[in-house]
Image (spheres, rainbow, N blue to C red):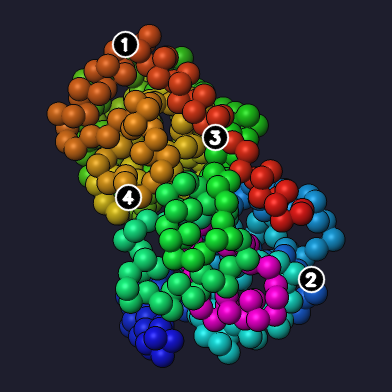
């Protein structure tokens, strides 16, 4: 099985090489690894994140350890360019690298160079050679905010190698009881429920938010509907709402902000009532007269929610929804598409009737007629979803206590 695993990784590398000729992300993936120059360290603390979402999820633990261990070099690795490119200069780390492709040679070389005293991986990404080398060297390896489901390879009859990878982990800090049960059933007992560190992240963000003067001017004391991390299917639905609610304003923050995508979105919205953020950021444009604002940059969304009243979270008509908790922390009732089953917090939100899942425009209008036209109904939802976020904080402190930090 290990031979097959190694072969599959080499096939993956070949596919990336081919893709790099026409795919910018693949090109960055290769270039970042080719130009890597790892500095020798002693007793470093190594955090690995698959991408940007996992970085934000693990950030509360990273921030606390940065404060608690100021003399240790903190190293971050990313697998994806979307994480590395945005956070390569984060002040929370001393070094930020792309993780070399998993192989025994790469794992030995990397660990020999950075000499970590501890390794922390967030949510997922299970690499045989890296985990094995950490295990052989008796370097503690922790998974935080972990979550498992029965469809994963670990729980299949052919998943023996992947179950072995799990056995190399010192301890799993898991989001839910189902994940604990699944691991116990395959003989992995170094587990505990800590919850999801994202709750800590979004709760602190909401408490310590900085105002954005341009958005305050745009709001102009009007209620705002925010579309966060939207895709074209989400944007079609949001666009349909504009004419139904004349007293509301709309902010749309697309997940992809290429010029082509932004121009396509702008063309579908009312001319003269819509503006993009880059056009008004100099402060000279009278923004309060616009009804719709398109965010054509990365990094503002989590702060924008402070001005919102209702949020539509994108991705639910594709592979899965994006971050609902950033909006929920500010008390925004959330709406999203049908593909949310992989996200515990989204399932909680639906089960507790704090948000809504929709399949089409008809569903959306039924939901928005309640939320956007009935202030008392919306305010009750707002208080309840905000309380839900606060009630689920505390994972970070539990993890730090357990690892004696």
- Tag in front: 2 or 1: 2
State the CA–CA distance, disc 4 to disc 2: 38 Å
Pointer 4 residue: 320
State the CA–CA distance, disc 4 to disc 1: 29 Å
Kindly state the secondary structure of the residue where label 3 is placed.
loop
Measured along the vertical axis of the image, is residue 176 above or below residue 372? Answer: below
Pointer 2 residue: 43
User: Given contact means CB atoms under 8 Å apart, are the residues at marks 4 and 1 in contact?
Assistant: no
Please give the name of the residue rendered at 80% of the width and 63% of the height, measured from the top-left corner: 72
Q: Kindly identify which numbered label has been placed on residue 392.
A: 3
Residue lying at the far left in this picture: please name it. Answer: 362
Horizontal and vertical percent position of residue 24: 39, 70
Q: Kindly identify which numbered label has been placed on residue 374.
A: 1
Measured along the vertical axis of the image, is residue 60 above or below residue 82? Answer: above
Q: Could you classify mark 1 by the number of other residues whose Cα lies within 10 Å: few (under 14), some (14-19), or many (20 or more)? A: few
* Mark 4 or 1, nearer chain start: 4
Residue 18 versus residue 353: which sits nearer the camera? 353
User: Given contact means CB atoms under 8 Å apart, are the residues at marks 3 and 2 in contact?
Assistant: no
* Mark 2 or 1, nearer chain start: 2
Q: Could you classify mark 2 by the number of other residues whose Cα lies within 10 Å: few (under 14), some (14-19), or many (20 or more)? A: some
Residue lying at the far right in this picture: please name it. Answer: 71
Q: Is residue 8 visible?
A: yes
Q: Quadrant of residue 88?
A: bottom right
Horizontal and vertical percent position of residue 143: 57, 60
Specify start and end residues of the magenta stretch as a single range: 120-143
């Amino acid at each position: 099985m290990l031979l097959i695993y190694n072969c599959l990784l080499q096939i993956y590398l070949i596919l990336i090489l081919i893709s790099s000729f026409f795919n910018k992300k693949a090109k960055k993936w290769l270039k970042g690894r080719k130009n890597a120059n790892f500095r020798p360290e002693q007793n470093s603390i190594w955090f690995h994140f698959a991408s940007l979402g996992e970085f934000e999820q693990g950030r509360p633990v990273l921030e606390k350890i940065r404060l608690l261990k100021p003399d240790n070099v903190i190293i971050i690795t990313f697998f994806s360019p979307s994480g590395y490119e945005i956070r390569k200069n984060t002040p929370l780390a001393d070094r930020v690298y792309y993780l070399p492709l998993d192989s025994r040679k790469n794992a030995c070389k990397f660990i020999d160079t950075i000499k970590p005293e501890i390794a922390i991986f967030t949510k997922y990404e299970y690499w045989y050679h890296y985990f094995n080398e950490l295990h052989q060297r008796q370097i503690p390896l922790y998974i935080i905010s972990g979550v498992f489901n029965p469809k994963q390879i670990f729980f299949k009859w052919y998943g023996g190698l992947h179950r072995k990878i799990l056995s190399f982990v010192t301890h799993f800090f898991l989001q839910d009881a189902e994940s604990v049960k699944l691991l116990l059933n395959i003989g992995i007992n170094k587990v505990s429920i800590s919850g999801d560190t994202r709750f800590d992240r979004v709760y602190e963000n909401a408490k310590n938010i900085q105002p954005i003067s341009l958005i305050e001017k745009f709001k102009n004391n009007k209620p705002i509907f925010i579309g966060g991390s939207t895709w074209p299917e989400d944007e079609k639905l949001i666009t349909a709402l504009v004419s139904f609610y004349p007293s509301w304003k709309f902010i749309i923050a697309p997940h992809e902000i290429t010029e082509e995508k932004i121009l396509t979105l702008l063309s579908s919205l009312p001319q003269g009532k819509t503006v993009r953020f880059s056009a008004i950021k100099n402060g000279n444009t009278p923004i309060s007269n616009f009804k719709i604002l398109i965010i054509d940059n990365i990094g503002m969304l989590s702060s924008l929610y402070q001005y919102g009243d209702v949020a539509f979270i994108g991705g639910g008509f594709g592979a899965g929804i994006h971050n609902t908790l950033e909006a929920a922390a500010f008390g925004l009732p959330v709406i999203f598409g049908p593909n949310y089953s992989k996200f515990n917090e989204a399932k909680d939100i639906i089960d507790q009737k704090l948000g809504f899942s929709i399949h089409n425009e008809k569903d959306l209008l039924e939901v928005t007629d309640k939320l956007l036209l009935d202030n008392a109904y919306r305010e009750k939802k707002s208080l309840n979803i905000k309380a839900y976020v606060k009630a689920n904080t505390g994972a970070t402190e539990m993890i730090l206590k357990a690892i004696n930090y």
